[in-house]
């Protein structure tokens, strides 16, 4: 229990130190923005920092949110690179459909779910429902599945 108490104190201390450092950083750039002969490019960057400051600080109070969006950008890169090879979607409807599929496949990848198994299960449910989308889709959401259901759809663990 003492260890837990010390861990909390250390975490609070680090959080306070982070807050103080970020407050000092904000004061610094606010001060720089008042300089009379500020280079236009520097002013542009500092104004952008001021404009986006609140969003940039979300990770401080919500540590589970990453400081950057590198993972999201990596996942979107597949669609962006593919778009160059697909010559567009041909229509707005097919563009929306493509976006939905990319979202589904990236979600499955994030949960280590085999897309072929998942699609087979989903399309079978549509066929069982006379070719219509099932009324309840929650059983197809990886985060709503039981551990057993999820394990049946996931790739085997190779570690």
Image: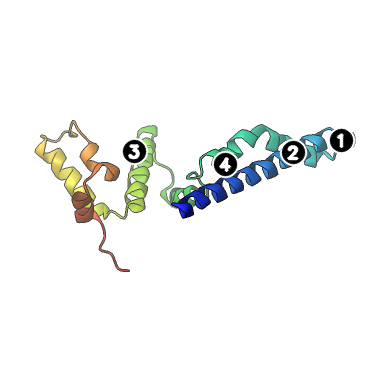
Residue 60's label in the rendered image is 4
Q: Is residue 155 left or right of residue 62?
A: left
Q: CA distance from mark 2 to mark 4?
A: 20 Å
> Are there few (<14), some (14-19), or many (20+) residues within 10 Å of tag 3?
few
Q: Residue at x 21, y 40 (%)?
A: 139
Pointer 2 or 4: first along the chain: 2
**Judging from the image, what secondary structure is the residue with disc 2 in?**
helix
Residue 62 rendering spot, x and y as whole percentages: 51, 40
**Judging from the image, what secondary structure is the residue with disc 3 in?**
helix
Q: CA distance from mark 1 to mark 2?
A: 12 Å
| Residue at the spot of label 2 | 46
**Judging from the image, what secondary structure is the residue with disc 1 in?**
loop
The mark closer to the camera, 2 or 4, is 4
**Pointer 1 with pointer 4, Cβ within 8 A:** no
| Residue at the spot of label 1 | 35
Q: CA distance from mark 3 to mark 4?
A: 36 Å
């Amino acid at each position: 229990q003492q260890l837990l108490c010390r861990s909390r104190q250390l975490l609070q201390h680090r959080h306070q130190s982070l807050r103080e450092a970020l407050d000092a950083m904000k004061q610094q750039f606010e001060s720089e923005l008042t300089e009379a002969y500020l280079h236009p490019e520097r002013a542009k960057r500092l104004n952008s920092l001021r404009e986006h400051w609140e969003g940039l600080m979300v990770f401080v109070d919500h540590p589970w949110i990453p400081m950057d969006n590198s993972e999201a950008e990596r996942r979107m890169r597949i669609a962006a690179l593919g778009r160059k090879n697909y010559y567009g979607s041909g229509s707005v409807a097919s563009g929306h459909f493509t976006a939905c599929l990319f979202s589904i496949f990236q979600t499955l990848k994030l949960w280590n779910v085999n897309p072929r198994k998942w699609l087979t299960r989903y399309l079978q449910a549509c066929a069982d429902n006379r070719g219509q989308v099932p009324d309840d889709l929650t059983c197809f959401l990886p985060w709503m599945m039981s551990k057993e259901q999820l394990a049946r759809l996931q790739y085997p663990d190779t570690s």
